Amino acid sequence: MAETIIYVVMCTIVAMIFVILGIYQYRAKNPVTINTGETPPKAEDLIDVKLWNQKHGRNLIILGIMLWCTLVVGGYVLSRINGVIAIIIVIVAGLFEFSWINFQHKKMKREYIK
C-alpha cells in the first residue's frame, strides 16, 4: 500500500508541473511557447496574444491531466496484470499525448501567427 501511495504522489507531482505551467501560461501577458527550445513569437506577429496564451495554457493543463491518468492507469495495470502490457500502454499513451500537444502547437502557429 505504501508503494502505491508514493507512486500516485510522484505521478501527481509530475502532472502538476504541467498544470501549473499551463496556469502560468494561461494568465501570461507576453507570448509563450510550449517547446523549450523555441523562441516565442513577438506580440506584433500574433493575431491575438491573449488567445494564443490561453490555448497554450489550456493544452498544458490538459496534458498534465492526461499524463496523470496515463501514469496512474499504467501503474494499476502494472500491479494487477502484466508489466509488459503496462509499459506498452504507458509508452503508447505518452507518445500520443506528446504528439497531440505538438500537433496543437503547430496548428496554433498556422492560425495565430501573421
Image (spheres, rainbow, N blue to C red):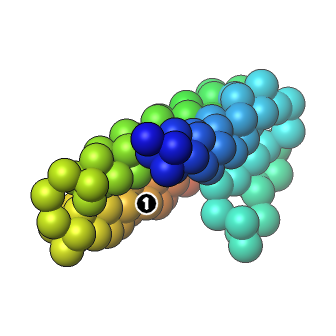
Return the residue at label 1. 98
Quadrant location of residue 38?
Answer: bottom right
Q: In the drawing, does residue 51 fall left or right of residue 99?
A: right
* Vertical position of residue 113 compared to residue 1: above or below: below
Q: In the drawing, does residue 45 fall left or right of residue 108?
A: right
Residue 8 visible in image? no
Mark 1 belongs to which amino acid?
Phe
At horizontal 77% and vertical 33% (from top left) the residue drawn is 24
At horizontal 40% and vertical 51% (from top left) the residue drawn is 71
Tell which residue pokes out farthest to the front in this image.
1
Q: In the drawing, does residue 55 fall left or right of residue 96?
A: right
Q: Nearer the viewer, residue 16 or 46?
A: 16
Q: Nearer the viewer, residue 73 or 34?
A: 73
Position in image of residue 62 (x %, y %):
47, 35
Position in image of residue 86 (x %, y %):
23, 63
Q: Element type at marker 1?
A: helix
Quadrant in which the N terminus appears: top left
At horizontal 65% and vertical 44% (from top left) the residue drawn is 13
Tally of numbered discs: 1
Q: Nearer the viewer, residue 50 or 15?
A: 15
Position in image of residue 75 (x %, y %):
34, 53
Position in image of residue 51 (x %, y %):
63, 28
At horizontal 75% and vertical 55% (from top left) the residue drawn is 41
Q: In the drawing, does residue 42 fall left or right of residue 110?
A: right
Residue 69 visible in image? yes
